[in-house]
Image: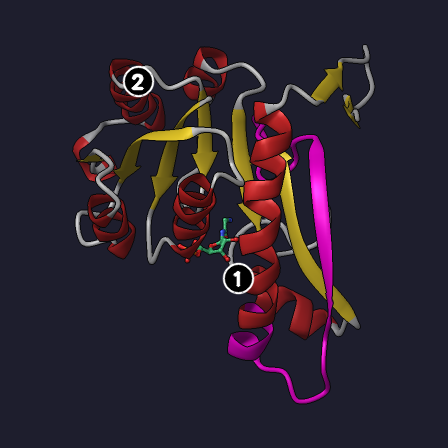
Amino acid sequence: MRLGVLVSGSGTNLQAILDAVATGALDASVAVVISNVSTAAGLTRASNAGVATEVVNHREYASREAFDTRLVERLRHHQVDTVVLAGFMRIVTRVLLEAFPRRVVNIHPALLPSFAGVHAQRQALNYGVRVAGCTVHLVDEGTDTGPILAQAVVPVLDDDDEESLGARILVQEHALLPKVLQWMAEGRVRVEERLGRRPRVFVTG
Ligand code: GAR
């Protein structure tokens, strides 16, 4: 599996992927890391691991589709077969999704379908839920709506703030994302499309 990892920020999930590749826990290679933010720390993490990096600044494109067209071009250049949104804070369009059908994976810091979109941890605290967590899912055209591959749960503690809850969730993210990618590398994920209903995900083996 040749991964293209898209990041916008610190890239700790990218680091978890790079570490899993290095230890052999994830049977894949990271072909390229692309960021829409030239200063993203994730780019440094990639360089440190000897992985190619690229910056594609969304502000230089007239539309989301034009931006995605450039992403697809760069991902194809690096012969990527699976795209990982690892803290990539842009909404992707069908241009990317049709180029990599059912091969675009996202990690979200909430138990979807609750608390989609930005500031998921803040949304969870504001709502007052007693458990929170993270979701790894295939991306579709909605925002954080695609078929769920796996979730992990953490407690919400009485004295939590956004930062403490976010840190607890992040620990789970770093374990879950490489694990799910390994399932995909092993060909264990099957998505059953169902007319008029949500697709159903099976993880075999
Ligand atoms: C992670 O918590 C990830 O789940 C979240 O951004 C953070 C990125 O951290 N993603 C989203 O909120 C996407 N809607 P990282 O850059 O250290 O991996």
Q: Which mark is residue 69?
A: 2
Residue at horizontal 71 percent and vertical 54 percent from the top: 152
Give the class, few, some or many, for how many residues have Cα within 10 Å of label 1's Cα (few <14, many ≥20). Answer: few
Q: Position of residue 156 (x, y in %)?
A: 72, 75
Q: Nearer the viewer, residue 121 or 18?
A: 18
Res 125 → quadrant: bottom right
Side of 34 where 95 appears, left or right: right
Q: Quadrant of the C terminus?
A: top right
Q: Position of residue 203 (x, y in %)?
A: 77, 28
Q: Which residues are magenta?
A: 139-166
Reading the image, the residue beneath label 1 is 119
Vertical arrangement, residue 8 with respect to residue 183, above or below? below
Residue at horizontal 65 percent and vertical 31 percent from the top: 146
Magenta span contains residue 11: no
Q: Nearer the viewer, residue 176 or 29?
A: 29
The amino acid marked with disc number 1 is His
Farthest bottom residue in view: 159
How far apart are the two marked residues, 1 and 2, measured between alpha carbons?
27 Å
